Image (cartoon, rainbow, N blue to C red):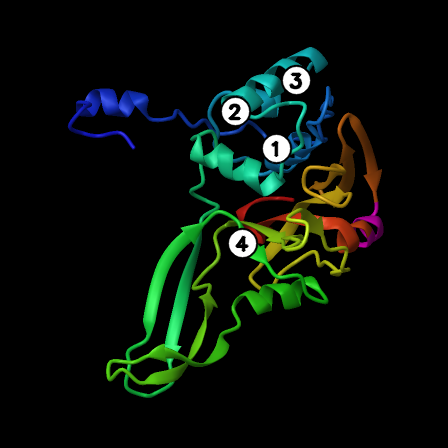
Amino acid sequence: MLSTILYPPLILVLLLPQFLSSPTPPSFPSSYPNPGNTCHLNSLLQSLRILNLKTSEPLTTSLHSTSRNDKLDSNLELLNALDLDWKVQYDVPEVLTLLISNQLLDPTPLLIPVTDVILPLDGKTTKKEKHSKVPILSLPLKRNFLKSLKAYETLETIRAQWKNSEGILTDIKKGTLLPSLPPILITSLNRFSLNPSTYEIEKKSTKCPIVESLNSGHILTSLICHKGDSTDRGHYISYVKIKNRWFECNDDLIREVKWKEVKRVGGKEGYVFFWRREEDGEL
């Protein structure tokens, strides 16, 4: 973090990222070449292009380059800026977090306020709350997407694990609440977990039927699917919705598809989901 002691106010302003607004929303997906193992980045760029978020270089150029050579050059420059190897496959939420932490993507419309709650059930101790903001909501894998979202806010009862002010162990309810949702909501399903025997990250292939809209008024604009058994193996593709038409984006291969196909593939392999509140823009 920059210090006002080391930098005068004027210089401090100049060192802040120059976020630029995106141009007119695209009318068609952009094909991105894959020189090695960049399908994770290609899929993420497709999803970010249609959200019209404010960005800074080199992400801005990657999102809006038109020629194949320019896309290759700008994407390699972007990976270098994130200290990532183009020959290695990375986890999409990890790359998205790096874009934000490196000040290449303005997180303002993405930040989700969350409240971690501990509620003692002894009737004497005050409820404990911790407030924070996160850019991605990581959801448990349930029988369908709405149940996954609901499970995130479920308060779990834990028996005799909390010592109250009198030193007596008491039951508590513990969990996370969502006071509100941002205009643009990004969610991921916990499809990957650490195998305690092999210490390897493994994928859960549990089906989780998806939906096109949420009760909050958010509409699904895109989703990223993972084909394979681990975050560092397999292949990423994305589905994006532009002017009520769905497209499958598989690196430089683009084809129009029906929602029925998106729903089928997304229910089995959907990993990261991008939502926009309906009144905040045309889909």
- Residue 69 coordinates in the image, percent (x, y): 69, 11
Q: Earlier in the sequence, mark 1 or mark 2?
A: 1
Q: Residue at x 50, y 39 (%)?
A: 97
Q: For the magenta stretch, what is the residue range?
A: 258-264
Query: Most prominent secondary structure in the magenta stretch?
Result: helix
Q: Which residue is mark 3?
A: 71
Residue 83's tag is: 2
Q: Earlier in the sequence, mark 4 or mark 1?
A: 1
Q: Which residue is mark 4?
A: 137
Residue type, label 1: Arg
Tags 3 and 1 in contact by the CB under 8 Å rule?
A: no
Q: Residue at x 35, y 62 (%)?
A: 130
At numbered mark 1, what does the secondary structure look like: helix, strand or loop?
helix
At numbered mark 3, what does the secondary structure look like: helix, strand or loop?
helix
Left or right, 123 with reference to 141: left
Q: Closer to us: mark 1 or mark 2? A: 2
- Residue 151 coordinates in the image, percent (x, y): 58, 68
Question: Would you call the spot at circle 1 few (<14 residues within 10 Å), some (14-19), or many (20 or more)?
Answer: many
Q: Is residue 80 magenta?
A: no
Residue type, label 2: Asp
Q: Residue at x 40, y 63 (%)?
A: 115
